[in-house]
Image (cartoon, coloured by chain):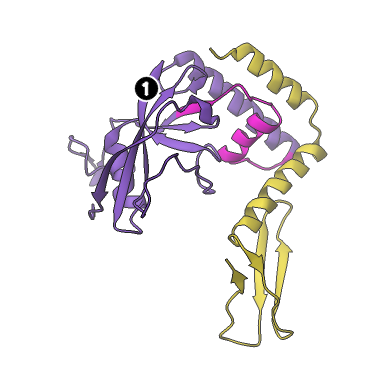
Chain colours: A purple, B yellow
């Protein structure tokens, strides 16, 4: 299956001809090229994390998801991924007395497990900001709780060949969302 | 299509070969690399005799940097 996904970067002088890999330490699933599943999240990321030049760009790509581990919509993949992740984490804890990070686990899959055929992982967390949710928080004992009903989904790509197309979709001026 | 059984077999084989030492070394190496990458890209410049940077290992897995300097205006000298 080929799906359109979105890549956000700061707007610079030259338009990109290929996406930029993320090498940040806090990148959930390690070094790779990250794409947003929904345009909304790509825009939000531009306004909150790609503000250095005052403008951000969103690129769209057609990506072949055939050899992607889909932990969001594919139950079998999700259960598999969870089981492997907890198995490796437990081995680390038993043998080293130390909890690994998610990035370290993922590095282990690729380096020691030699999962070369996994071209990417589709994964999700929940939105960190509830301003854009369309439901009111629930009040309980003087505290407010928001149900983050929408998934924030990303794809990390490890093998560039699954990226079929890459083109600039839009350039936008950053706005303050606070 | 991904062959999940094959992936699991490869992972299980890798785990079965791990010892306390091999996993500890792998994790230490990862964390040391991450620690060193926090300096950014570029080359380290020589600093004066009055200044020193000491890298300490606070436990088996975490690394800390301590900057000792007689010059209070000292800034770490990294050339990017």
* Image position of A34 (left or right of A135): right
* Image position of A71 (left or right of B22): left
The kind of secondary structure element at disc 1 is: strand
Q: Quadrant of residue B43?
A: bottom right
What residue did someone put label 1 on? A3
* Residue B71 position in % (x across, y down): 62, 87
Quadrant placement of the C terminus of chain B: bottom right
* Residue B61 position in % (x across, y down): 70, 51
| Residue B55: in magenta span | no
* Residue B47 position in % (x across, y down): 69, 79
Q: Quadrant of residue A62?
A: top left
Indicate whether B8 appears above or below A147: above
* Image position of B70 (left or right of A47): right
Would residue A147 be seen by someone viewing this image from the given angle? Answer: no
Binning the other alpha carbons within 10 Å of mark 1 as few (below 14), some (14 to 19) or many (20 upward) gives: few
Indicate whether A81 appears above or below B41: above
Instruction: Residue at 66% x, 13% y: name it.
Output: B6
| Residue A111: in magenta span | yes
* Residue A108 position in % (x across, y down): 66, 33
Indicate whether A4 appears above or below A36: above
Q: Which residues fall within the magenta stretch?
A: A96-122
Instruction: Residue at 59% x, 58% y: name it.
Output: B38
Closest to the observer: A150 or B47?
B47
Would residue B53 be seen by someone viewing this image from the given angle? Answer: yes
Instruction: Residue at 54% x, 48% y: name it.
Output: A25
Closest to the observer: B74 or B55?
B74
Chain ID for label 1?
A
Q: Quadrant of residue A176?
A: bottom left
Could you tell me how many numbered marks the image carries? 1
């Amino acid at each position: 299956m080929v799906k359109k996904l979105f890549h956000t970067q700061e707007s610079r002088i030259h338009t990109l001809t290929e996406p930029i890999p993320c090498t940040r330490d806090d990148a959930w699933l390690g070094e790779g090229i990250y794409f947003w599943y929904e345009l909304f999240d790509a825009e939000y990321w531009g306004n909150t994390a790609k503000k250095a030049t005052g403008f951000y760009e969103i690129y769209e790509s057609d990506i072949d998801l055939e050899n992607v581990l889909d932990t969001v919509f594919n139950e079998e993949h999700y259960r598999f991924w969870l089981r492997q992740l907890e198995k490796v984490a437990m081995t680390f804890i038993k043998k080293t007395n130390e909890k690994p990070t998610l990035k370290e686990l993922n590095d282990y899959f690729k380096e020691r497990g030699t999962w070369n055929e996994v071209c990417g992982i589709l994964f999700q967390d929940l939105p960190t900001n509830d301003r854009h949710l369309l439901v009111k928080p629930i009040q309980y004992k003087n505290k407010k709780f928001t149900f983050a009903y929408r998934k924030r989904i990303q794809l990390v790509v490890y093998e560039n060949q699954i990226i079929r197309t890459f083109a600039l979709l839009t350039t936008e001026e950053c706005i303050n969302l606070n | 299509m991904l062959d999940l059984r094959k992936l699991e077999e490869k992972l299980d084989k890798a785990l079965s070969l791990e010892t306390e030492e091999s996993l500890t070394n792998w994790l230490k190496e990862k964390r040391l690399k991450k620690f060193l990458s926090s300096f950014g890209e570029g080359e380290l410049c020589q600093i004066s005799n009055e200044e020193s940077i000491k890298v300490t290992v606070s436990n088996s897995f975490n690394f800390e940097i301590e900057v000792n300097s007689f010059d209070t205006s000292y800034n770490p000298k990294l050339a990017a």
